[in-house]
Image: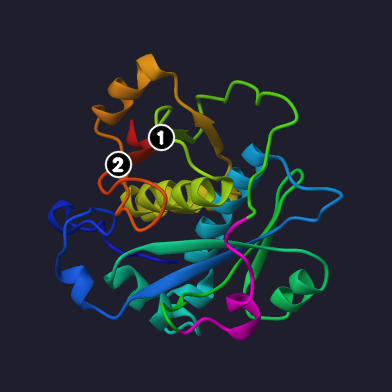
Amino acid sequence: MSTEPTPPATDSPFRAEPGDRDLAPQYVLPLVVRIERAAPPARTDALETAARAVLVLLADERSAGDGEWAGAVRDWQDARIRKVVRRARGAEWRRAGALPGITVTGKSAEVRVFPPVPLDGWPRDLAKLQVSGTELDDPEPPAAPDRSGPVLWLNPEVGMSAGKAMAQAGHGAQLAWWELTDAQRADWRGAGFPLAVRTADPAEWARLTAGGLPVVRDAGFTEIAPGSCTVVADHPALR
């Protein structure tokens, strides 16, 4: 099991200001969402599946100790925590599935997460995939979340593409994972990493960000302004 300590607040991997993490070799965690023309996934399910995919990789035995992915995971977490979501369909998805990684399936979404790679060293079959075109919709408004379980709350005032929101949900899940004890992590993992991703009510957002829960502040590499608060990780063990 991964036992990385919580990053110090003065050197958060998600903060906007330059720091020691910027001097380290930069890695990125690739995630690929399957988007077939005839049957795209629902947006909320894609966000939740991406968040679970990040947790599944962090909890995998290959990511810890002397595991085959452990060195790459450590190097990635020692630098900025970057995640990039690309889309694939048909033969592209099959080629992505042949590379080392883990596929996580939701109700309608499939997301494959791969061990971190150097920022400029993507495998060819992943580098060819598009970042754009991940706009997804919910066929109907998602139901109210089960507040007795983990909820990743999105900022209601920050618009994001589905791909960007998937990466941010993954950030929120990762921050919650870092804050938990080994026993709490084991319980979450044993339950299958249940979680919900929802957009917070504007009136509740200020309370959420001020409540001591883990907050993702985006570094501003894409789409949104540096320092924007994007996700609050509301895990019951952290309330």
Residue 214 x, y percent position in the rendering:
31, 41
Residue underneath mark 2: 228
Residue type at tag 2: Ser
Indicate yes or no whether the magenta region holds residue 12: no
Side of 35 relative to 198 (left or right)? right
Indicate yes or no whether the magenta region holds residue 122: yes
Q: Nearer the viewer, residue 159 or 181?
A: 159
**Marks 1,2: beta carbons within 8 A:** yes
Q: Is residue 65 visible?
A: no
Which residues fall within the magenta stretch?
Answer: 121-132
Residue underneath mark 1: 158
Q: Nearer the viewer, residue 160 or 201?
A: 160
Q: Nearer the viewer, residue 237 or 114?
A: 114
Would you say the magenta stretch is mainly helix, strand or loop?
Answer: loop
Residue 63 x, y percent position in the rendering:
47, 74
Indicate which disc, 1 or 2, sits on the residue closer to the N terminus: 1
